[in-house]
Amino acid sequence: MRVSVIATVLNEGESIRQLMDSLCAQTRQPDELIIVDGGSRDTTVAVIESYRDRLPLRVVVEPGANISRGRNVAAQNATGEILAITDAGVRLEPAWLAELIAPFESDSALGVVAGFFFPDPQTVFEAAMGATVLPQVGDIDPATFLPSSRSVAVRRSAFEVVGGYPEWLDYCEDLIFDLRLKTVTSPFAFAPGALAHFRPRGSIRAFYKQYYLYARGDGKADLWRKRHLIRYATYLIGLPVLIGLALAVSPWFWLLLLAGGVIYCRTPLRRLPAALDALPFKPSAWDWVKAAAWIPVIRAVGDVAKMIGYPVGLRWRRENQPPAWR
């Protein structure tokens, strides 16, 4: 079975070395590596090219290509039966590719293998971020898991049937890709050992922008209507009502608000020990307190970003009438 690793990059500079070094260290080397550069204005291409003597590498430069277009171009230039997809900004475990490919070798009908991703925090804030927004392996139901394109492998025939990634969509493109694959292939296999490590966002501002763009992508693709409606109802109706009752009727309603906040943060707090253990230093007791305090802030900022970004995406959808993907 011929295996192609594909990725797309833009302005990654020296940071691309962690991905390239981790590809060099794979216990199962790819038959080819196709990287599409979207028109970097820094040293990205030169750094990647410096690995040509260590990897079966081909670099394609397509200025202006978004993430979807970049991955599709990479797939078009690849010759492998299996396309193993990853992303810039990650560090792959040495057994990443071997773990992704193993299920295909035992099941010739399998169309998709979902790998997994794990936060690689360098600060206390990043550990809190990872605990708040990223699932752990124990949270995953393999039957319903939609893999990130940081770590997934797809049979070429399935990739071609769904037409690759939606090039009209700039964010949430991998969700649409996954949902379309679900309609044409057997159930996805789950390979939790195919791990990609990446750093969570390092500031509230960067996180707000990320979730605003994700929610805008949801609106463009008409995704998760019910989830977004529940969020609007919670913040614009439920929360004001409870605050009003606490102020006008009884202070006991503050306990309901507190209980709701604890429930809302329960899962991130459960994940926090593992996230802090992943730090490159031993966190102090004060670091634990700071990380726990960041969790409700991150949750609230993420929700606000989604509530602002989603209607922007819906307006874009109404004005541009993108292709039907369902």
Image: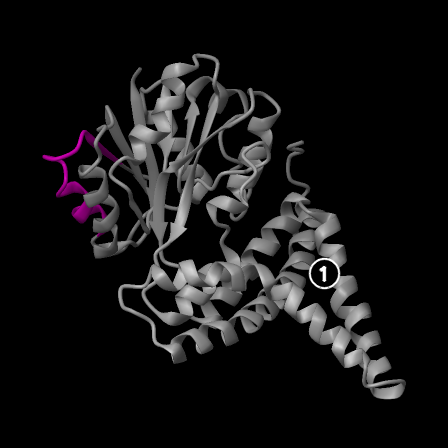
Q: Amino acid at mark 1?
A: Arg
Query: Looking at the picture, how far across and down is residue 99, in whole percent?
Result: 34, 30
Residue 3, picture quadrant: top left
The residue labelled by disc 1 is: 231
Side (left or right) of 319 relative to 178: right
Side (left or right) of 245 relative to 6: right
Q: Does residue 164 lie above or below 87 as drawn?
A: above
Q: Does residue 245 lie above or below 180 as drawn?
A: below
Q: Is residue 38 visible?
A: no
Q: Is residue 49 visible?
A: yes
Screen quadrant of the C terminus: top right
Query: Looking at the picture, how far across and down is residue 234, in whole percent?
Result: 76, 65
Q: Residues within 10 Å of mark 1 (few under 14, many from 20)?
A: some
Side (left or right) of 290 relative to 61: right
Query: Looking at the picture, how far across and down is residue 90, in whole percent?
Result: 32, 49
Magenta highlight on residue 228? no
Side (left or right) of 265 relative to 315: left
Magenta residues, as a range?
Answer: 44-59
Q: Secondary structure at mark 1?
A: helix
Question: Which residue does the image show at 52% across and 48% down from the upper left?
Answer: 171
Question: Which residue does the image show at 32% across and 63% down from the upper left?
Answer: 279
Query: Looking at the picture, how far across and down is residue 161, in whole percent?
Result: 53, 20
> How is the model colour-coded?
one colour
Question: Which residue does the image show at 60% across and 65% down from the upper left?
Answer: 265
Question: Which residue does the image show at 33% across and 33% down from the upper left?
Answer: 6
Residue 281, picture quadrant: bottom left
Screen quadrant of the N terminus: top left
